[in-house]
Image (spheres, rainbow, N blue to C red):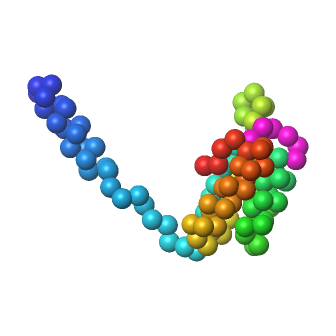
Amino acid sequence: MSDKTLRDMRQTRAARTVGPAPTITFPCDYSIKVVGDAADDFPATVCQVVSRHDADFDATRLEVVASRNGRFQSVRLTLRATGEAQLKALFAELKATGRVHMVV
């Protein structure tokens, strides 16, 4: 197989994977991970913000994982998403706390 053939195959595969972004059907259960500096009150801060955007949020299903060196924490949770506007507002408020480094 020539080098040209290999390049052509890669381009063809890339062209197949590019397409419209997947859509979300609302309402749905939506999982997120919030990463910030490790602190005793970080999970509670995240819960307070999420509760303002999802009145039925169940904080008992929260999962907190410390980074290997203990400097960061990730808070994993599932909320009831009702629309894109709700998610954008939630992400903005989490970042506005100044304690959140990333929301995935």
Which quadrant holds residue 14? top left
Instruction: Please say if 101 is above or below 51.
Output: above
Q: Main secondary structure of the magenta part?
A: loop
Instruction: Please say if 101 is above or below 21.
Output: above
Q: Residue at x 74, y 41 (%)?
A: 36
Q: Specify start and end residues of the magenta stretch as a single range.
A: 36-41
x then y, percent, for residue 12 = 20, 43
The reply, left or right, for residue 103 in relation to residue 21 is right
x then y, percent, for residue 91 = 66, 55
The reply, left or right, for residue 50 in relation to residue 86 is right
Q: Residue at x 78, y 65 (%)?
A: 51
Q: Residue furthest top?
A: 3
x then y, percent, for residue 62 = 75, 56
Which quadrant holds residue 13? top left
User: Residue 10: in sight, yes or no?
Assistant: yes
Q: Is residue 38 magenta?
A: yes
Q: Residue at x 60, y 49 (%)?
A: 104
Instruction: Please say if 62 is above or below 56.
Output: above
x then y, percent, for residue 8 = 16, 36
User: Residue 74: in sight, yes or no?
Assistant: no
Q: Residue furthest right?
A: 40
Q: Is residue 26 magenta?
A: no
Instruction: Please say if 36 is above or below 80.
Output: above
